[in-house]
Each structure stands twice: as structure tokens, then as C-alpha cells.
């Protein structure tokens, strides 16, 4: 008679449960980092992986003047993510796989504003002019090695420019 052997599984991990924050979310600099590891053993196979994710910003700027003045601000936002995984099969070595991914997104924005407030014959006049300009860059890479199928890769890159209410983005995949 045929008897099915139960699968034995052991798993331990915290994929994005470990983290740390640096800076002040309401201030001029902030980074939030999350990451972790996973380790899993099944009948004849083991999975091991690392993951990291970080998001944040840095900004600088100020204003000066009263009835005539100017303000300038610059801010950079970013997101970074990386993963490394290995799946090693003792039972079916051809199913062994190694995988890595990396992604980086950066957006930089600059804004400038100038104003003038005057009072002429009891009438208040307010004149203001400003503009903003932004650049966005996104990069991503994925690599996979499967022992029975070979190497695979995917790469993505894009650059975007924003200004005066319009945007232009060019990307390659």
C-alpha cells in the first residue's frame, strides 16, 4: 500500500518587520528603513532571503522680505528597495534558483516665488510670480538564475522632467 509522507516545514522570518526611522517627518530630513530576512526549510529544499526598503526626503529653503520678498525651496524624495533570494532544492537540483532585484526612485523639485505688496491711494495691490521645476529618475534591475533554464534579466530606466504645469518622461525597458 502507498503511504504519503507528510511535508515537513520550518519557517522563520521577518520580511519587512524590522525597521528604524531617522530624522523628523515634519522637518527637513527623514528616512524610514524597513527590512528583514526569511529562512524556510521544506522537504528537500531551502529558501533564504533578505529584503530592504528605505524611503525618505531632504529639503532646504527659506523666504525673506515683507511687502517685497522672495522664497526658494528645494526638496529631494527617494525610495530604495532591494531583495536577494535563494531557493536551493536538494531533491530537484534543476529547480534551484537565485534572484535579486534593486529599485531606486528619486524626485527633485525646486520652486521659486517673488511677491510685491503695495498700497496706492488706499487700494492694496498684490503681485506674485513663481515657478517650479522637477526631475524624476527611476532605475530598476531584476536578475534571476535558474539552474535548469539559465539566466534572465530585466532592466528599467526612466527620466522625467516637470515644469510650468507640463511633464515629459522617457523610459527604457
Image (spheres, rainbow, N blue to C red):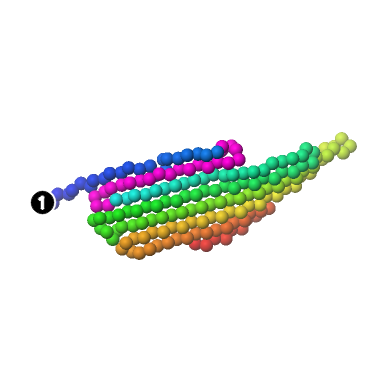
Q: Nearer the viewer, residue 120 or 26?
A: 26
Residue 118 visible? The answer is yes
Residue 113 placement: quadrant: top right
User: Is disc 1 surrounded by few (<14), some (14 to 19) or many (20+) residues within 10 Å?
Assistant: few
Q: Is residue 42 magenta?
A: yes
- Chain part drawn in magenta: 24-45
Who's the residue at 42% across and 48% down the image? Answer: 51
Left or right: residue 70 versus residue 5 is: right
As drawn, the residue found furthest toward the top would be: 122
68 vs 150: above or below: above
Who's the residue at 37% across and 52% down the image? Answer: 85
Residue 55: percent from the left, percent from the top? 51, 45
Q: Is residue 148 magenta?
A: no
Residue underneath mark 1 = 1
Residue 158 placement: quadrant: bottom right
Please tell me whether mark 1 sits on a helix, a strand or a loop: loop
Left or right: residue 64 versus residue 78 is: right
154 vs 119: above or below: below
Who's the residue at 63% across and 52% down the image? Answer: 134
Residue 70: percent from the left, percent from the top? 74, 43
Left or right: residue 82 versus residue 146 is: right
Who's the residue at 34% across and 49% down the image? Answer: 48
Amino acid at each position: 500500500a502507498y503511504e504519503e509522507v507528510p511535508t515537513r516545514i520550518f519557517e522563520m522570518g521577518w520580511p519587512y518587520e524590522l525597521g528604524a526611522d531617522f530624522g523628523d517627518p515634519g522637518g527637513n530630513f527623514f528616512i524610514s528603513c524597513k527590512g528583514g530576512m526569511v529562512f524556510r526549510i521544506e522537504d528537500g529544499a531551502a529558501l533564504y532571503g533578505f529584503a530592504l526598503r528605505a524611503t525618505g526626503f531632504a529639503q532646504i529653503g527659506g523666504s525673506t522680505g515683507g511687502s517685497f520678498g522672495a522664497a526658494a525651496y528645494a526638496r529631494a524624495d527617494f525610495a530604495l528597495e532591494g531583495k536577494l533570494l535563494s531557493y536551493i532544492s536538494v531533491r530537484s537540483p534543476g529547480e534551484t534558483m537565485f534572484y535579486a532585484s534593486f529599485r531606486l526612485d528619486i524626485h527633485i523639485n525646486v520652486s521659486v516665488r517673488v511677491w510685491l505688496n503695495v498700497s496706492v491711494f488706499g487700494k492694496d495691490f498684490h503681485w506674485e510670480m513663481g515657478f517650479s521645476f522637477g526631475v524624476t529618475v527611476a532605475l530598476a534591475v531584476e536578475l534571476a538564475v535558474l539552474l535548469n533554464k539559465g539566466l534572465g534579466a530585466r532592466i528599467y530606466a526612466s527620466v522625467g522632467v516637470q515644469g510650468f504645469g507640463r511633464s515629459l518622461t522617457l523610459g527604457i525597458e
